[in-house]
Amino acid sequence: MAADFSHAYAVIMAGGGGTRLWPLSRKDKPKQLLPLIGQETLFQSTVARLKELFPPERILVVTVEEQVLEMKQQAPELPEENYLIEPAPRGTASVVGLAAMVLQKRDPQASMAILPSDHFIRNVDLFHYLLKAAFDVAADNYLVTLGITPTMPSTAYGYIQQGTPLKGEYKYPVYTVQSFREKPNEETAQQLLRMGGHSWNSGMFIWRADAIMGEIHRQMPALGKALNEIGTAWDSPNREEVLKKIWPGLKNETVDYGIMEKAEKVAVLPAGGLGWSDVGSWSSLFEVLLPDMNGNIATSASLHLALETNNTLIYGGSSDRLVVTIGVDDMVVVDTGDALLICKTDQSQKVKDVVEHLKKHRQEKYL
Amino acid sequence: MAADFSHAYAVIMAGGGGTRLWPLSRKDKPKQLLPLIGQETLFQSTVARLKELFPPERILVVTVEEQVLEMKQQAPELPEENYLIEPAPRGTASVVGLAAMVLQKRDPQASMAILPSDHFIRNVDLFHYLLKAAFDVAADNYLVTLGITPTMPSTAYGYIQQGTPLKGEYKYPVYTVQSFREKPNEETAQQLLRMGGHSWNSGMFIWRADAIMGEIHRQMPALGKALNEIGTAWDSPNREEVLKKIWPGLKNETVDYGIMEKAEKVAVLPAGGLGWSDVGSWSSLFEVLLPDMNGNIATSASLHLALETNNTLIYGGSSDRLVVTIGVDDMVVVDTGDALLICKTDQSQKVKDVVEHLKKHRQEKYL
């Protein structure tokens, strides 16, 4: 049924760290807080995208202490009380539960979209349309996941296999979920792409707060009980104290494994043509930024002079720095003040090995 | 006959500019003044190499006004009066003539080795041995050129075709010169290497001052006359004035074309095993620096972390800068404060095109 959009909320999950965009992303400057694409940070773009659909009062952010100040500066239009802080990372199940609990207190009829803070979406109008369609499905007590129609045999995402079309008058085709699959190997990914009927799990969910809370109590009773306790203290002076006491004891679990896989009413809305990217590696920038005739991307502050250079991304540098490439193909060059990365594009996932190496050798200043 | 080494002089030609090691070499910091290999600059290494054979009083430097101060700082052990300054670049024939004229005034029995300031020589003992052997040949009034036995079919050098062995009791095989050849194309270079009997023209010459002066007067009478005029004024207060008046009118000519090709008594001493390089491009550093097991050269001030990286040179950077390469093969990376060069090694000769481009677009600060 058509959702009453005045009870629809957006919850941005923004606490992540991530190492795959090193040396730009750092411990104290995670991906979502960086202007990776254009002038705005990914977090700012996410807020901007949602503000066209939700008033600021109905956009919440769940993050960690270390990032909240920077976020408030980047998105001052969101009310102070809409920033929720995880005392420690305990997986997306706990984050979702906290947000649902808070929303239920504010609005017993609340429904919510859970959205990552660090994704890119080119076609914002379509995104809005699909999100509204998903809220309609959620109004019928489904836990809806926004699947992304694969454009290549990626091994970087989990896959959702759709079942039968949902009955009902929806604005867009929606399906039951046949199964959730973990990240496949190359061969399986090829197969899933050929078979069709499989979407990437984007981590975007839409549901009624009471529906997800019901599943939490059914499938993760310990989390449910903890949320009850936190909820009781929420509007008292003990909020912080209770939260900090209970939170660290929670099981670290994702909402996918902890809830979605065995939930009773799950639906997938397979979204094609969104121009979506999780900006999960340097190579992904080739999908979201516009290359020149030679496939090069000049998103650099520096002056870039390219000779015999193709499909190469130059990122960073400073305005009085000249970057010259000669005979360079399929590379990513990232130049920060203290570090320089030169990486074959198809090996950009190895950047996380670099970060591991730096951790192991206690090169703190580069982390 | 055996040379009287107490009349042997070394003349370092050090006025060149050159663009092939950009962005390290710059207009005001040419190749010879840079510490390209180890701690010493190429000029300092050249002086050090010669000081083992010649006392400082018998080592002269011919350079240009713009470089002489820096050179005096880099080699303070050479007497002030041993630095000769070309008022303007007029080719090696003029430089050689100037040095020969000055030496004849100081020592009518002078013989001299003409040596570039910016070459690398790994086997210094052999170099000394060959230089002494060449002075013995020069004592018999030959104009001797030190040829380099080719180790690959290079198209970067002129070639010297040897003729018959010189008669005489010399310490090393020496030959008449059959012909001088300009830089060949790839095919010809292959052929010359297979044929044998051809050396690279290294620009190192050894001769008696009166022998070269005789040839100058015979083949380049205008230069001979000019040198006479300059010589007359040399020990008078008019030295500078006369030099600056006459020099700009000299014909710009190399000693190879102007004199060597048609000289009467020319000999070549083909030097093998010197470990010589003219350090004429970034790729040449792979010949003179010691790579690690993967063929990488870490001559960088920065910390270099290499994953799946082979045959790659990292040059420059600063001590608090981390350079990471992933999946990089056969590349040269040169990091200066204001510029970054990333170049496929076999295309490093294109660096001079970059400099041309910068000149054309008046990017003075990078030149």
Image: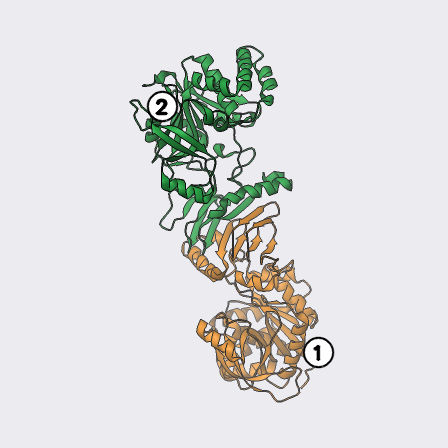
Chain colours: A green, B orange
From the viewer's side, name the closer residue of A142 and B67.
Answer: A142
* Residue A45 in view (yes/no): no
CA distance for labels 1 and 2:
92 Å
Residue located farthest toward the bottom when viewing the structure as drawn? B167
According to the image, label 1 marks what residue? Answer: B6
If the image is split into quadrants, where does the N terminus of chain A sit? top left
Q: Residue at (62%, 79%) from the top-left corner? A: B104
Q: Read off the chain for label 2.
A: A
From the viewer's side, name the closer residue of B210 and B147.
Answer: B147
Residue A276, numbered label = none
Q: Position of residue A312 (x, y in %)?
A: 43, 49
Secondary structure at numbered mark 1: helix
The amino acid sitting under disc 2 is Leu
Q: Read off the chain for label 1.
A: B
According to the image, label 2 marks what residue? Answer: A53
- Are the residues flagged by discs 1 and 2 in contact, CB closer than 8 Å? no
Q: Position of residue B61 (x, y in %)?
A: 61, 68
Specify whether disc 1 shares its chain with disc 2: no
The amino acid sitting under disc 1 is Ser
Q: Position of residue A104 (x, y in %)?
A: 45, 14
* Residue A256 in view (yes/no): yes
**Image vertical order of residue B25 relative to residue B325, above or below:** below
Residue A198 lies left or right of residue B177; in this view the side is: left
Residue B210 location, quadrant: bottom right
> Crowding at label 2, few (<14), some or many (≥20) Cα neighbours within 10 Å?
some
**Image vertical order of residue B146 relative to residue B66, above or below:** below
